[in-house]
Amino acid sequence: MSQVEESIEVNVPVRTAYNQWTQFESFPRFMEGVQRIEQRTDKLTHWVTKIDGVEREFDAAITEQIPDERVAWTTVEGQAKQAGVVTFHRLDDTRTKVMLQLKYDPEGLAETVGDKLGLVKRQVTGDLGRFKQFIEERGGVETGAWRGEV
């Protein structure tokens, strides 16, 4: 398993950043390569990705969700093996540090080479930057929220 850790500061309150992150179906708006996410239950999401022409589908289970603190997941079925957690850290009333930790298992020669070249880390960095831009351009108004716990 390979691992990536990356963080970014966003200029919105922790509640806003967390609320937006719980809107999984909006991820294609800021995550490159994510074509579609369906929230099937409070604990199960279905992902369709297409990266460098390779399409994959998989289900991910939300293993922990604590409002304004963290969302953790792991794949449970499909063409990808990964697990991760995103945590939210209040810096002050209007700024939040969003930290993403991802463990993944590259599949095949192309993914292994890409992993060694740091492509996944660059992808995560870009996705977090696009998340920042997405939520800040909305004036700190999230597209929705799910405040339940898992």
Image (cartoon, helix red, strand yellow):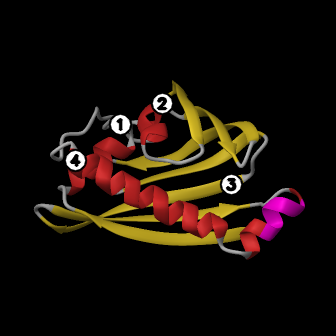
Cα distance, mark 2 to mark 3? 19 Å
Residue indicated by mark 2: 42
Of callouts 3 and 1, the N-terminal one? 3
Res. 34 mark: none
Among the two numbered marks 2 and 3 on one chain, the one whose residue lies closer to the N terminus: 2
Picture disc at residue 148:
1
What residue is at 41 percent from the left and 70 percent from the top? Answer: 7
Residues under labels 2 and 1: Cα distance?
8 Å
Q: Earlier in the sequence, mark 1 or mark 4?
A: 4
Relative to 143, does residue 113 appear above or below in the rendering?
Answer: below
Sequence-wise, the earlier of marks 2 and 1 is 2
**Residue 105, image quadrant:** bottom right
Disc 4 is placed on an element classified as helix
Residue 33 sits in which quadrant?
A: top right
Residue furthest to the left = 93
**Is disc 3 in contact with disc 1, using a CB cutoff of under 8 Å?**
no
Residue 75: horizontal and vertical position, in percent?
A: 68, 45
The one nearer the camera, 54 or 67, is 54
Check disc 4 and report the residue beneath it. 137
Q: Quadrant of residue 115?
A: bottom right
* Horizontal and vertical percent position of residue 85: 51, 58
Image: 26 above or below 131: above
Residue 68 appears anywhere in the view:
no
**Magenta-span inclusion, residue 149:** no
Magenta-colored span:
109-113
Type of amino acid at the residue the image marks with label 3: Gln
Q: Which residue is mark 3?
A: 82
Query: Which amino acid is tagged 2?
Result: Asp
Tell me which label, 3 or 4, sits earlier in the chain: 3
Q: CA distance from mark 2 to mark 4?
A: 28 Å
Circle 4 crowding by C-alpha within 10 Å: few under 14, some 14–19, many from 20: few
